[in-house]
Every structure is written in structure tokens, then in C-alpha cells.
Amino acid sequence: MAAKTLEDWQKMRDGLSYRNQAFIDGKYVDAASGKTFDCTSPIDGRLLAKVAECDKEDVDRAVKAARKAFEAGKWSEASPAKRKAVMLKLAQLVRENSDELALLETLDMGKPVMMAKNVDMNGVANNFQWYGEAIDKMYDEIAPTDRSGLGLITREPMGVVGAVVPWNFPLMMAAWKLAPMLATGNSVVLKPAEQSPLTAIRLAELAMEAGIPEGVLNVLPGFGETAGQALGMHMDVDGISFTGSTEVGKYFLKYSGLSNMKAIALECGGKTPNIVMKDAPNLEAAAREAGSAIFFNSGQVCLASSRLLVEQDIKDEFLEKVKEVGQFMQPGDPLDPKTMMGTMVDNTQTKRVLGYIEAGQKEGAKLVLGGKQVRQNTGGEYIEPTIFDNVKNSMKIAQEEIFGPVLSTLTFKDAEEAIQIANDSVYGLYANLWTNDLTKAHKMARKIRAGTVNINNTNGGGLVMPFGGYKQSGLGRDGSLHAMEKFTQMKATYIHLG
Ligand code: NDP
């Protein structure tokens, strides 16, 4: 089938219908209060849907349904092979509906539709497939006790778990949480971000069609301060996995302490140092990735390579090449398949990012590319790829997560200084290092305080690798088989044999 054109996507958009209710106990329902909030598109400001605004009462309803389903055991006690079959079916349904899901994502948060399809929806389907396939290959352990006993160490589903997710990769972040949660037999309550609820709501229907029993997956659109907090404080929720800001991540630790000590897993963003040594194997490739790794998704990425650290002798030459990437990745209509960069998620984020650009200039960094809001005549939220040179690591733009297409360039004289700058951050999620010297690479990687260190790339190896942060980037890991650990309890059963 021929790839869709801009006109095809526009036509599809004009015929699209939007699910806009909460999904509780296998049914679409209004919020108990009857309240709704406006879900608008950052592409042109149009109203997409009025979405159910869930609050504490709805959280109670969803948690009760989830607990009932968990106790009934239709999912929590189903054989791994049965859960696998359902999850593979869900992966297939996501693939079959990927155009619609990608379009919903694009309209809701403004990323280019081809990226929504090829990166996000492909990633969502792969997540359900990968964890589905894994679950019937996981073995438990027998402890090395003496011969008078038998010690079994088994993993059990945690129970009712919550997922609170952000708007930058709305359905993909949800899938990162849901796939290991469901694979291990939990019942789940998902709260999408207020900016991007549409794909999560639609996913619930696909999950039912795949065979996830009623009550096992509940979706509650609503606001963080009400629905998110109520989930965090709920006495019958056993664990929560959150991705978002460090500030809100800390609230979840507090909610846990003030309620029932529920397990908390956090992924709270970063300030990735991208360290380029002059002996990098291919400076052209390093520059291409330095650009795309900050401008991809308009920089609204927790692992965005937002601090470019270049060995001082090659900085000018290298920066020229990175600028070319920025010049090429100018924002355009997200429905146009040729567009590389879309919008910011909303006007609040646009103002936030422009505020950082202003702060960078005030603090004395040199603006060498972009810096402005563009395409304002469309009613959309576009910011140009922006590059600062002469940045000091103490500056606000080098310390705080901007979450926009803004690159800060710094220099260093040797490996020791590069590591010192890289580690001088409250974050420790991700780091990239470009060098041809394997010994140097290993030595530096050991000293960098980050959950992931990439050598000669910026992409981290995908789903098979654990992903999460040191320091204030979070607790626990998404991705890989290790993600399953967060959503299971470890049980020791000791049998006296005499
Ligand atoms: P938040 O951390 O506020 O939002 C993430 C999720 O948490 C959303 O579902 C949100 O709901 C929910 N939430 C918000 N406040 C509370 C609360 N008090 N209790 C419980 N849940 C809550 O991120 P923002 O959308 O405000 O973005 C601000 C900044 O956070 C970004 O600029 C970026 O720096 C960082 N961020 C990092 C992300 C990452 O991938 N690590 C992802 C998103 C943001 P609601 O949407 O209704 O507010």
C-alpha cells in the first residue's frame, strides 16, 4: 500500500471520532462528577474532544474494580501462556490500528505523524509483544539451603498498580509501564497526562478486544493534582510507576509515606551530557546525532542530549556541523509525512522554553541558531531548533531540564574535566561519549554517574536494555526483564523436609 500523503492524513483527521470517557471495569463511563476538560491540539488550537475529568471518586471506583479483578484471578492467576496469547493479540491490534493511534497522538501533542507511527506505535506494539513473549520463559529460584529443607523464591504479581505517565511519548510511556505490569499478572489503573489522554483511552478498547478481562486495565483521564494525587494516596494501591518531572516524582514518594508505603518507581528526566572527544571515530556521524538527539520530538525527551560537551580544539568545526542539522530540522506541519519536527505540547511549554532561551541570553551564553517561536499564523506551538555556544555549566540552561529544542554547548580540555562537567548535575539518566579509544571509553563510562552510558551512539540499545536514572533522575528501571521486578513481590517459601 502506498504511504499516506499529507492530504490522506488530513482526510483521515476530518473523519476521526474520539473516545473521550474514562474506562472503568471494562466499560466507558463519564466521570462521577460529570465534569469534562477540553482536549485541544497544539497544531492549530482546535478543540479535539471534551474528555472526562476524573477525580478521587473515580480513582476509588477504578481501584475497587481492579482489586475485584485481581482477587477473582482471571488474569492474576491465568497461566503465563494465556497471558502471553492475550498480549500478543494486543500487540497485533496496535499494529492494525497504528495509523489511527499515530494520528490521535499527533493531533493531541503535536509530534510528526510519521514519527508517531514509526517510533511510538511501533514501540508500543513491540513492548506488548516483548513482555508477552517473555512471561512464559521466566523461572523462579530454589535457595541453596541444607538438605533438611527446600527454599522456594518466587515472584508474585504485586496486586493493584498505578501508572502515571507524561505527554511526550504518551502511549509509548504507558506501554513501557503496562506491558510488564500486565505480563506479570497485575491489575492496572492508568492516568495519562492531561495534555494527551486520547490514545490511552482508545487503547483500553483494544485491550478488551485482545482479551484483557474487565477491571484489569482501567484508564482515568484527569488532572495530576486530583486524579494523580488520589491514586498516589490510595490505601489499596500496591505500587505506582511514574514518568515525569522530578518535582512530581518527589510528590509520589511523599504520597507513599503518607498512605500505605506503596512501592514507587520513578523516571524523572535528565540533562544528558553528549561528550565528543577529538578522537571520535566519525565526527560527521557524531555531529548528525548530536543534532537529532536534541531536536527529535522538539527536544521534549527525558534523554535528549541537551548538553553538548566538545573537546576545545574541535569545538568550532564540530558546532558548524551540528548547526547544519538544526537548519535542516525546521518545524513543519506534523501531518506532513516529510516533517521532521512538530510542535511543543502546549502554550505553557512554549512559554517555558522561550523563558529558558531568554535566561540563556541574559546569563551571557551566545545564541548561534534559532531562538524564536515560528509559524504563529497556524495557531500552533512551534519553536525553532536553538543552539547556544559559550555555555557555562553553572548556567540555568545547563542545569535545568528545558524539555525543548535547545542545545547548550560547552568545552573541556581533557577527559577528567569532561567527567567533572558531565557529573555536575542533579540528574543522572543518560550520557553519550564519542571516542575511538576503547580503554578511555571504559574508564570514563565507569566514572559517569548515569543509568545509561552510550559509547559512539545516542540511542541506548532499545527495549532489551534497562532504562532509568541515578540521582534525581529517578528510582528503578523501565525496559528489559528488570522492569518486571518492580511489579512483582518476592516470596520466600521454606519447606521443612526433616
Ligand atoms: P509533570 O511531572 O507535572 O506530569 C507528569 C504526570 O504527572 C502527568 O500525568 C501529570 O498529570 C501528573 N501529575 C502532575 N502533578 C501531579 C501531582 N501533584 N500528583 C500526582 N500526579 C501529578 O510534568 P509536566 O507536564 O508539568 O511537565 C513539566 C516538566 O516536567 C517538563 O518541562 C519536563 O522538564 C518534565 N517532564 C519530564 C518527563 C520525562 O520524560 N521524564 C515527561 C514530562 C515532563 P497532569 O498532566 O494532569 O498534570
Image (cartoon, grey):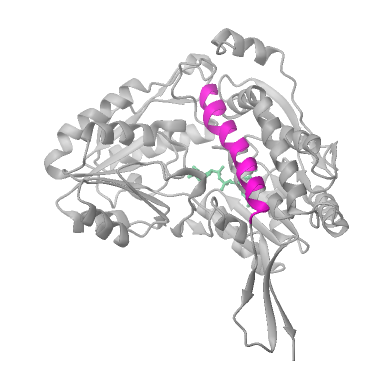
Q: Position of residue 299 (x, y in %)?
A: 43, 35
Residue at 30%, 31% (x, y): give it.
288
State the predominant SS element of the stretch in magenta. Answer: helix
Q: Position of residue 55 (x, y in %)?
A: 77, 47
Name the residue at 52% across, 31% down: 119
Q: For the C terminus, which image quadrant?
A: bottom right
Q: Where is 93 relative to 184, above or below?
A: above
Residue 9 lies, in percent from the top left, at 60, 14
The image quarter in which residue 310 lies: top left
Give the residue furthest to the top: 7
Residue 113 is a magenta residue: yes
Above or below: residue 33 compared with residue 39 = below
Front one among 355 and 12: 12
Q: Give the magenta range.
A: 111-137
Residue 110 seen anywhere in this rendered image of the structure: no
Please state, as top left, top right, bottom left or bottom right, where the N terminus lies in the image.
Answer: top right
Q: Is residue 372 left or right of residue 130?
A: left
Quadrant assignment, res 327:
top left
In this rendered view, identify the residue nearer to me: 457 or 348: 457
**Is 6 colored magenta in this rendering?**
no
